[in-house]
Image: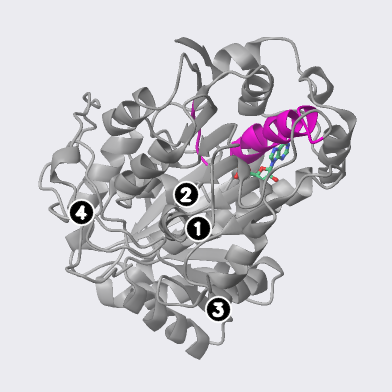
C-alpha cells in the first residue's frame, strides 16, 4: 500500500490542474469555478483515479475531496465513453457514488453536474424521503453516474430498478459517517451485487479500525492518501468557547449574533426539538432563522438551505445528521449551541467553516453538565479550546476545568455491538452505546440511540 502525506504534496513543486491528466471540457468547467490550483487531495487523487488505481483517502469536507473524485471519474467515463464501449443499458449504471445523507447526495450530484457540464454524460441522484417512482423512471434509460444513499438504493435494487452488470467504479463518500449511521449491512449487500472487477474509491474523514476493515474487503492495492491528521480540526478555524448556564444559552446566542453582527451563522443543536425551540426563540428576537433536521421534509430542508445560502435566512439551526454535507462557500460562523455526544462530530461541525482555505470561527456554548463531553472533544482534537467570558453571562453553575490532554490510543473495532434500529435514509441509528463517557479518553463510540426515534 503506498501512501503520500499532505506535507509531501505541499513540499513539491506547485501543481496545476493542467498537469493532472484532465481533458479540456473538465479543465474549462474547473476554470468556470474559479479554482486556481488543485487542493492537496485533488493533486494526489486525480492522476491516481485516472490511472485506474483504487484510492483510500482520509479527507474531511472542505478539502476539495468532492472534485477530487468527481473530476477523474468524469474523465474516465468520458474517455472510455459511449463511442468505444457499448452504451449504458436500461437500468444500468457505470459509476455508483454512495453517500450517508440526502443532502450530501444532492450536493455531490450538483458537483457532477457542475464539473460535467461540457461532457455528454448522464447522471442522477436517488435518496429517501421523496417519491421513488420518478427515480425509477430516471433510471430506466441507464445512467453513467448514480449518486445514492444506501437505504433508497437498496429499495431500488429490490424493485429491480437498478442493475450493476456494467458498473466500473464504486465510490464511498464519508464512509465513517455511513458506518456510524448503521449502513454497514446495506453497504455490504450493495458491494455483493457489484461486478468483482471494478475500481474502488473510499473517502472518510477518519480511518477507524471499522473503516479499515471495510476497506480491506473492498479495495485492491489502494493508493492511501491523507490530507489531514486523523481527527485534526481544520487549521484555519478559530475556536473558542463560552461557559454559560444552560437556561441562558438562547440569550447568549442572540447577544453574540447581534453584538458581533454575524450575518450567516450555522448553529448546531443536539435534538430536533431543541432546533425547533431555538429557531422560535431567535425569530421572537427579531432574527431570521430556519431549522433543518430529520423530521423536516426534503422540500423544507432544501428551501431552508437555499434561503440560508442566499442570505434571506441569517441563522440556520441544524442537527448533526441534517447538517452533514452542507457546503456553503465562505461560511464564516459555526456555533455549537449544544456540544455533540460523539466527540468526532465536533470536528465535522467545525469543518463547515473555513472551507477550502477560508478562515472561520467556531464557538461553543458550554454548560456545566457538558464538561465530560468537552473533555472528550479536547482529547479528540488534541488541544484545549480557548475560553472567553462575558460578564453578563458568567454562569452560576461553574464549568469545571479542562483536563490534561491524553494521547490518542489505537482504537479497536466495535462492530459487534452495533445493531441497526431504524431504516430510513439519513436516519440510521446504532444501538447499544452509552450516550456519554465518564472517561475523557474513550475509543470511538457510535451515536447514542434514543429508543426508536431519531432524536437529532
Ligand atoms: P469539498 O471538500 O469537496 O466539500 O469542497 C469544499 C469546497 O471547496 C467547495 O465549495 C468547492 O467548491 C471548493 N473547492 C474545491 N476544489 C477547490 C479548489 N481547487 N480551489 C478552490 N476551491 C475549491
* Disc 4 element: helix
Q: Is residue 41 above or below residue 154?
A: above
Residue 395 position by quadrant = bottom left
- Please report the bounds of the magenta region as a residue range: 57-82
Q: What numbered label is drawn on residue 371?
A: 4
Which is in the foreground here, disc 2 or disc 3?
3
Query: Is residue 65 highlighted in magenta?
Result: yes
Query: Between 132 and 447, which is closer to the camera in this rendering?
Result: 132
Q: Is residue 136 left or right of residue 189?
A: right
Q: Quadrant of the N terminus?
A: top left
Query: Between 253 and 313, which is closer to the camera in this rendering?
Result: 313
CA distance separating discs 4 and 3: 34 Å
Label 3 CA crowd tier, 10 Å (few <14, some 14–19, many 20+): some
Q: Could you tell me residue 119's position as x and y percent?
A: 84, 42
Q: Which sits earlier in the primary sequence, circle 2 or circle 4?
A: 2
Q: Which sits earlier in the primary sequence, circle 4 or circle 1?
A: 1
Which is in the foreground here, disc 4 or disc 3?
3
Which is in the foreground here, disc 1 or disc 3?
3
Q: Is mark 3 within 8 Å of ligand 1?
A: no
Q: Is residue 130 left or right of residue 314?
A: left
* Disc 2 element: helix
Residue matched to label 3: 300
Label 1 CA crowd tier, 10 Å (few <14, some 14–19, many 20+): many
Residue 405 position by quadrant = top left
Residue matched to label 2: 350
CA distance separating discs 2 and 1: 6 Å
Q: Could you tell me residue 227's position as x and y percent?
A: 53, 25
Residue matched to label 1: 334
For the residues bearing labels 2 and 1, Cβ distance under 8 angstroms:
yes
Amino acid at each position: 500500500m503506498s501512501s503520500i502525506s499532505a506535507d509531501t504534496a505541499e513540499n513539491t513543486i506547485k501543481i496545476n490542474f493542467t498537469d493532472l491528466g484532465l481533458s479540456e471540457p473538465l479543465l474549462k468547467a474547473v476554470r468556470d469555478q474559479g479554482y486556481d490550483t488543485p487542493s492537496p487531495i485533488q493533486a494526489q487523487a486525480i492522476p491516481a483515479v485516472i490511472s485506474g488505481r483504487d484510492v483510500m483517502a482520509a479527507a474531511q469536507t472542505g478539502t476539495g475531496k468532492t472534485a477530487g473524485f468527481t473530476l477523474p471519474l468524469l474523465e474516465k467515463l468520458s474517455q472510455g465513453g459511449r463511442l468505444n464501449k457499448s452504451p449504458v443499458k436500461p437500468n444500468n449504471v457505470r459509476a455508483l457514488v454512495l453517500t450517508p445523507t440526502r443532502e450530501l447526495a444532492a450536493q455531490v450530484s450538483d458537483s457532477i453536474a457542475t464539473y460535467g457540464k461540457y461532457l455528454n454524460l448522464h447522471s442522477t441522484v436517488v435518496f429517501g424521503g421523496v417519491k421513488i417512482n420518478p427515480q425509477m423512471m430516471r433510471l430506466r434509460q441507464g445512467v453513467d453516474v448514480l449518486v445514492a444513499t444506501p437505504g433508497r438504493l437498496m429499495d431500488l435494487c429490490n424493485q429491480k430498478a437498478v442493475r450493476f452488470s456494467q458498473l466500473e467504479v464504486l465510490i464511498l463518500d464519508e464512509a465513517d459517517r455511513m458506518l456510524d449511521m448503521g449502513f454497514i449491512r446495506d453497504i455490504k449487500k450493495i458491494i455483493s451485487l457489484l461486478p468483482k472487477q471494478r475500481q474502488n474509491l473510499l473517502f472518510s474523514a477518519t480511518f477507524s479500525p471499522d473503516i479499515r476493515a471495510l476497506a480491506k474487503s473492498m479495495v485492491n492495492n489502494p493508493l492511501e492518501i491523507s490530507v489531514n491528521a486523523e481527527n485534526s480540526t481544520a487549521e484555519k478555524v478559530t475556536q473558542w468557547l463560552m461557559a454559560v448556564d444552560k437556561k441562558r444559552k438562547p440569550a447568549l446566542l442572540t447577544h453574540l449574533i447581534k453584538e458581533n453582527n454575524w450575518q450567516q451563522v450555522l448553529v448546531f443543536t443536539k435534538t430536533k426539538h431543541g432546533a425547533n425551540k431555538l429557531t422560535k426563540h431567535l425569530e421572537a428576537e427579531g432574527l431570521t432563522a430556519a431549522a433543518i433536521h430529520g423530521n423536516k421534509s426534503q422540500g423544507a430542508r432544501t428551501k431552508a438551505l437555499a434561503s440560508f445560502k442566499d442570505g434571506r435566512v441569517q441563522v440556520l439551526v441544524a442537527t448533526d445528521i441534517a447538517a452533514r454535507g452542507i457546503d456553503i462557500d465562505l461560511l464564516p460562523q459555526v456555533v455549537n449551541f449544544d456540544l455533540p455526544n460523539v466527540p468526532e462530530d465536533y470536528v465535522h461541525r467545525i469543518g463547515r467553516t473555513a472551507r477550502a482555505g477560508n478562515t472561520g470561527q467556531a464557538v461553543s456554548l458550554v454548560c456545566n453538565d457538558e464538561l465530560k463531553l468537552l473533555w472528550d472533544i479536547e482529547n479528540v482534537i488534541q488541544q484545549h479550546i480557548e475560553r472567553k467570558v462575558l460578564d453578563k453571562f458568567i454562569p452560576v453553575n461553574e464549568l469545571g476545568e479542562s483536563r490534561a490532554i491524553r494521547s490518542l490510543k489505537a482504537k479497536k473495532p466495535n462492530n459487534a455491538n452495533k445493531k441497526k434500529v431504524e431504516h430510513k435514509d439519513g436516519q440510521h441509528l446504532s444501538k447499544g452505546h452509552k450516550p456519554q463517557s465518564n472517561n475523557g479518553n474513550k475509543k470511538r463510540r457510535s451515536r447514542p440511540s434514543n429508543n426508536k426515534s431519531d432524536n437529532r
